[in-house]
Image (tube, rainbow, N blue to C red):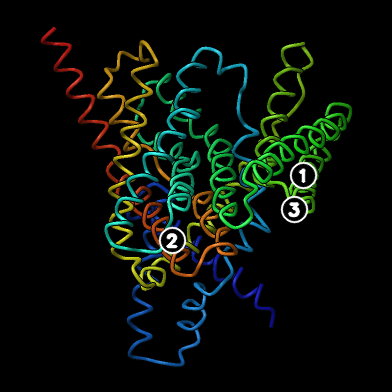
Amino acid sequence: MSGFLIYTVVLLLLIVIIGYFNEKVTKFTYEISLMLFSVVISTVLLLVNSFVSSVPVVEILNSFHKINLQAFLMDGVLCFMLFAGSCHMRVLDFKKHARIIGLLSIGATLLGAVFYGLLFYAIVRLLSLPLSLPVCLMFGSITAPTDPIAATSILKKFNLPKDTGFIIEGESLLNDGVGVALFVCFSGMVTAEESGNFFVVMAKELFGAVLVGLVVSSLCFLVVRSTKDLTRRIFTSLLAVSASYLLCEYFGFSGAIASVVCGVMFSAFRNFEAAKGNVLEFGQFDGFWEILDSLLNSMLYVMLGLSFPHILQMPHVLLMSCAAIIINLVGRSSSVGLMSLLSGKLPDGYDKFSFMKLLTWGGLRGGLSVALAMSTQPFLESGAYYIVLGGTYAIVFFTTIVQGMTMAKVYQGIEKKRRSHKVKA
């Protein structure tokens, strides 16, 4: 019997059962429920497996942590997830908040990665662990980008002001590409410790990927614009992102950056056509990519949840995961706070501190961070790799479960203080 089919059926079964149970009983945010209950299931199975052996269902579910998630993400679905996240951007709508979104997606992501890397390096030096400064900075770039899917789902649960919600969503959509670019730069520093060719590596991976994404998406959109077949437009978008990723893999460029470029270019092209009065039908296109993105993210959250208890058993991981979570909050709040000082007047009457608190607690992490962490295995020693992977898992779990489940209360507390200040004024 096909192992692929068995794993697919088990994943879909868990997604359906957990989703249905959550809809009828717990009513958590969808992504939160998938990860939380998957972690619970995996933990229970570990306990059962320690007392009872040779149970087929337990063996199948316990074996999920052995699946090559790196291959699943980096060689399979990551390009489609990145494209789906960026192709829905409404580029022309960013004009009103371009300054603050740019500061958050570029400035806060860069500063967050650097702050995180430096703080983590200090902890590493204190504990005499085998991580260099470039590796810690690379770790910072892995954990810096926020996840648009989780953030958007949670924001819909309560009535966040329109402009503020758009800024948070816009930041999370744009900083995926920024985070990948930073990862390419810092991972180039790590590999340059041996090769000594940091600028060559960075230029090749970064600029080569941008060039491939621009050329392929431009050629494919010519087909999208000229065809009236709605299904063919979807097929062409699939061709664009998969061909870009494959070409980058062949030439040694960053396929992740090329995927983001393809998504942004498709979004820009369709907005440009609409501005000229040539409105193209994209309802089916948007529906397809939203469903595909939801499916891939659902599978990923379940796989992460099932793997999480096993990851925590790696050497040094539990201690460093706790440090990673604390440092992540410090790095995120510091970078967002500095950028808010430069942003001028904030939307919806927010003061600097309330805005910083909202964006810090709303900065959830997702599949991209895990994918980038897993991609470091070929050039990191096993001890360093386990710490990077375990810390990333811990941050994704903490931000998705803890921050996600308490986001509504944090927002309500912020709004209560804002109302009381308005009354006093």
Q: Position of residue 300 (x, y in %)?
A: 53, 58
Q: Position of residue 93 (x, y in %)?
A: 57, 17
**Quarter of the image holding residue 323?**
bottom left
Q: 415 or 167: which is nearer to us?
A: 167
Q: Are circles 2 and 3 on residues that touch, CB within 8 Å?
A: no
Q: Can you say which quadrant of the picture contains the N terminus?
A: bottom right
Residue at the (62%, 35%) spot, across then down? 86
* Location of residue 120 with respect to 65 vertically, above or below: above
Question: Which badge, 2 or 3, is on the more N-terminal residue?
Answer: 2
Q: 271 or 232: which is nearer to us?
A: 271
Q: CA distance from mark 1 to mark 2?
A: 35 Å
**Mark 3 residue element:** helix
The kind of residue tagged 3 is Glu
Work out which residue is located at the far front of the displayed protein and give it.
196
The kind of residue tagged 2 is Ile
* Location of residue 62 with respect to 287 vertically, above or below: below
Q: Which residue is mark 3?
A: 249
Q: Which residue is mark 1?
A: 244
Q: CA distance from mark 2 to mark 3?
A: 36 Å
